[in-house]
Amino acid sequence: MNKLKVDFNRPVILGNELEYMKQAIESGHISGDGAFTKKCHAFLEEKFGVRRALLTTSCTHALEMSAILLDIQPGDEVIIPAFTFVSTVNAFVLRGARPVFLDVRPDTLNLDESRLEAALTPRTKAVVPVHYAGVACEMDSIMGIAAAHHLAVVEDNAHGLFGKYQGKYLGTFGCLAAQSFHETKNFTSGEGGALLINDPVLVERAEIIREKGTNRSRFFRGQVDKYTWVDIGSSYLPSDILAAFLFAQFEQHEKIQLHRRQVWELYHAGLRDWAAAHEVQLPCVPEGCEQSYHMFYMLLPNLELRQKLIAYLRERGIYSVFHYLPLHLSDMGRSFGGKTGDCPVTERVSDQLIRLPFHNALTSSEQELVIDLLHGFPF
Ligand SMILES: Cc1ncc(COP(=O)(O)O)c(C=O)c1O
């Protein structure tokens, strides 16, 4: 048996991370909105063409800011895929919204746009598509339906920085988009996120909400002579030390994205025939979508085999993980009326999905080991 250990995720220094953190400290400004935060904002705004980008302490917080910005009120309904992370829904429930869980497509595991229209009621205020694994939702349909019914679209783009739909970057479709820089993401500051604001009307209020409900940003721009409490808000801005780390990762974006693409392609090439022979479903990237190379997942034929495979790999030093549990069947989801059978695709894929080791320092020999072991898995 091999003695190698292959981590599921591993944070790595790729360039100037430590040097920039030192510079931030030596500059005397380590609270929020220092020089490195501004560099991160400029990078996101210029690279992706968003009106305004604001770093946040997490994607969760960028989603919470979105719910406040959209004035979500008790009783409003928000459409969320049942197959997503808890923050996608929690951010809106915190404002009193009632989540309406929609099933996902069996191919991309993204919100099933064909079910969207039937889920709308006069109380529906927003829809939150999640670009699972950084593969785009069907944004033409979603944006069309949202426009026809005057719904806000908030993209949960936690996985999708650098992904594209019909040539346009993910995170630039909705009025708002939330990014994650948590340690498992392509670019990280340990914990971190960003709110991308595409609707100019929302920019100034976003700055206020992020700064404890004060107009501090206007004060720093010299637009008011003192700053004060003007709205609800919280403290959603990260330390400039974290922004320094993140900016160093942004500087390496070409290298990171190329490496991750190679990782994804090596898994895909090494597993394609094996998967077909054993009824294992590999990720689907539809025509017109360019993925962000965030993760490599597979759908095993059933829960028993999925669990057996995770244990088999773990006994051999390989760390693989499952992913989301169906939100509508969680304690909270059931309290909103969720029940077994509401979202059959979500219920099935949640049992079947396994994510293979995937990070910025993963080597091809580690991947070959994973692939070889998978080939030897006794189904
Ligand atoms: C789809 C999705 N949205 C939001 C989040 C929350 O991100 P964060 O940990 O940055 O708050 C995650 C976490 O991985 C996620 O998968």
Image: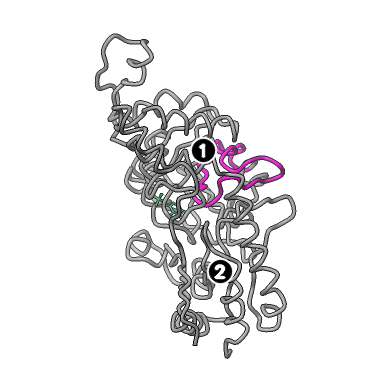
Q: Is residue 366 above or below residue 69?
A: below
Q: Which residues are magenta?
A: 145-174
Q: Which mark is residue 345?
A: 2
* Residue 277 rendering spot, x and y as whole percentages: 70, 83
Classify 10 Å Cα crowding around label 1: few (below 14), some (14-19), many (20 and above).
some
* Residue found at x 59% / y 81%: 374
Specify which label sits upstream in the sequence, 1 or 2.
1
Q: Is residue 92 visible in the rendered structure shown here?
A: no
Give SS at disc 1.
strand
Q: Is residue 335 above or below residue 145?
A: below
**Where's the C terminus, which quadrant?**
bottom right
* Residue found at x 56% / y 69%: 345
Mark 2 residue type: Val
Q: Which residue is mark 1?
A: 152
Where, by quadrant of the figure, is residue 278 drawn? Answer: bottom right
Furthest residue in direction right, as rendered: 287
Q: Is residue 25 left or right of residue 309?
A: left
165 magenta-colored: yes
Give SS at disc 2.
helix
Where, by quadrant of the figure, is residue 270 drawn? Answer: bottom right
* Residue found at x 43% / y 67%: 325
* Residue 92 rendering spot, x and y as whole percentages: 38, 46
Q: Is residue 268 visible in the rendered structure shown here?
A: yes
Decide: marks 1, 2 in contact (CB < 8 A)?
no
| Of the pair 235 and 144, the residue shown nearer to us | 235
373 magenta-colored: no
Mark 1 residue type: Ala
* Residue 63 rendering spot, x and y as whole percentages: 41, 43
* Residue found at x 46% / y 71%: 321
Q: CA distance from mark 1 to mark 2?
A: 25 Å
Furthest residue in direction bottom, as rendered: 378
Any atom of ligand 1 within 8 Å of the CB at mark 1? Answer: no
